[in-house]
Image: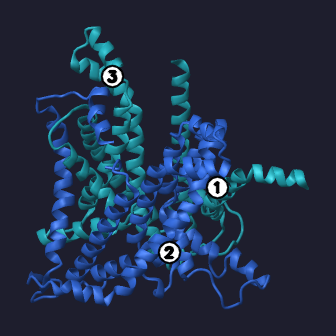
Amino acid sequence: MVAFKATSAKVFGLKDNKSFLPYLLLIPGLLWLALFFIVPIFSLGQMSTKVPGAQTGQFVQGYRFTNYVDAFNASTEQFLRSFLYGILATIIALAIAYPLAYAIAFKSGRFKNILLVLVVAPFFVSFLLRTVAWKQILGEEGPVVSVLRALHLISDTTSITSSAFAVVTGLAYNFLPFMTLPLYASLERIDPRTLEAAGDLYANGFTTFRKVTVPLSMPGVVAGTLLTFIPAAGDYINAAILGSPSNKMLGNVIEARFFKIVDYPAAAALSFTLMAAILVLVTIYIRKAGTEELL
Amino acid sequence: MKQMKKWFSKNLIRIYAFLAFTYLFIPVLYTFVFSFNDSRKTNLIWKGFTLDKWKNPCGAPDVCNALGNSFIIGLTATTISTVLGTLIAFALGRYKFKGRSTTNLLIFLPMATPEIVLGASLLTMFVNLGVNTSMVTAIIAHVMFCISFVVVTVKARVASLDPRLEQAAMDLYANEWQTFRRVTLPLVAPGIAAAALLAFSLSFDDFIITNFTAGTVNTFPRFVYVSAGRGIPAQANVIGSAMFFLALFIVIAAQITSSRRKAKI
């Protein structure tokens, strides 16, 4: 792969320009990212070790690294829940999106483009409106609970919203296109002749799928699961709208520490821990899955 | 019976896809249907059909003010991020230079960072600097998280260009600027348009980063979030549905024009 990358530059006509033109093109955008992405991350790190100052809402640098321990101990539960919910939502989204992407890539014929638009279309309705819609559909006065209760499939006191189930499916729903599109992109790129070749070598449909289609779609699986897991683990809207207080995720804690309790150092420590944990997890995952192509 | 079973197993994947689409569209349909609900303040129970909310989408307090703010932030952030991102995409797609992998990493990292961390870190920086969060800080934040998506989208288009088209232009005595202006830019334009559309929808729909960086400025997602507790007014459903149809129209129109253009060639 590395060898390919090195030569691809020549093949696709990358100009070996000794001038500073490329840097001129890069500077404005990269400067923006440096000032408003890199610098803020440092501010966050700085804030995370501060201690309360003389006035409320004022903090002075005290290099108090135990902020991390305190913040983590106070919200271990929500921290673990963020990762658990994130992983569950990713698995559910993969289970829904893989067959869907497969059907669009191989079985849709001339409707391919229309179906692709349809995958993205629901996401033109605001993220929050859709989440609120789910809350009302699955809620106490909604059709689903009424029908299930009338059929005595659930008891009169059981509800669907305000539960882990609602939060996890809400997360899976909201990030579904991030899963479907990369999967589709990698499935669509598979040369149909490789599948025919597998058939010619007496592999049945399932073996072909398992030994040819799945390995060839791995870059899509890796990209899709990452694009779903990262926002899902950091989300707090689904937990806030669809969950109960016992389904709070780390995002909810960070938000409350910032806006309700005004404990910036603890919020910063938690944000920093979340980012570090996700980066470590993602790095391990990319190594294991063996695709470096993502970058 | 046997035939039915055979049909079923043959079309299993299609049935599955149909169910998946149904699942995807349930909340959309619900939002659309309840935009016609003859409700007063909350929009929880079906009270009867009315077109009133469509005739007067600004009828609920604050909703159009929030929508207007979302448009101002979205359009400004889209313009800036599309320009900055496209420049980077050209540099990455066209030139070999030192620091390429660092650039790629810097583009990738914001996409791999959870929104809450981006929002929290920006707010921390603004607090440290003593800057009051406002619409300006929200636009700054939106440009930041849109740039990477623009770069990725435009870069794909730049990389898929056939270099022979530019060589042909040069052979016909076009200078470098003319080649860019007359050949390269028109060919990359659909990618830039797609990137701008993506940037706008990301910005328009963003809640978490906005919540951290916009101070007291109300945006449409913020309006929905705040009203969610006591029930959102049907006007929000009208606006959500209208945005849905507008976006669908733009995407389908773009698809049709691009397939027509392909048919011409």
| Pointer 1 residue | B21
Do the dots labelled 3 and 1 sit on one chain? yes
Q: Residue A133, relative to residue A194: is it above or below?
A: below
Q: In which quarter of the image is the N terminus of chain A?
A: top left
Residue B16, can we see it? yes
Whether label 3 touches label 1, CB < 8 Å: no
* First in sequence: mark 2 vs mark 1: 1
Q: Chain A is drawn in which colour?
A: blue
Q: Residue at the right extreme?
A: B1
The location of residue A245, given as percent across then percent down, is 46, 87
Q: Disc 1 residue type?
A: Phe
Do the dots labelled 2 and 1 sit on one chain? yes
Measure the C-alpha gap from mark 2 to mark 1.
26 Å
Q: Disc 2 residue type?
A: Ala
* First in sequence: mark 3 vs mark 1: 1
Measure the C-alpha gap from mark 3 to mark 2.
52 Å
Check residue B163 in the rendering and tell me which mark sits there, or answer none.
Answer: 3
Q: What element carries label 3?
A: helix
Q: Residue A252, relative to residue B54: is it above or below?
A: below
What chain is the cyan one? B
Q: Residue at x 73, y 54 (%)?
A: B12
Q: In this view, does A106 lie to the left or right of B100?
A: right
Q: Please tell me how crowded label 2 is: few (under 14), some (14-19), or many (20+) other residues with Cα within 10 Å.
A: some
| Pointer 2 residue | B228
Measure the C-alpha gap from mark 3 to mark 1.
39 Å
Q: Which residue is drawn at 32% across and 51% down?
A: B146
Q: Residue at x 53, y 18 (%)?
A: B264
Whether label 2 touches label 1, CB < 8 Å: no
Q: Is mark 2 on a helix, strand or loop?
A: helix
Query: Based on the displayed image, in which of its 4 quarters is residue A281 positioned?
Result: bottom left
Check residue B263 in the rendering and tell me which mark sits there, or answer none.
Answer: none
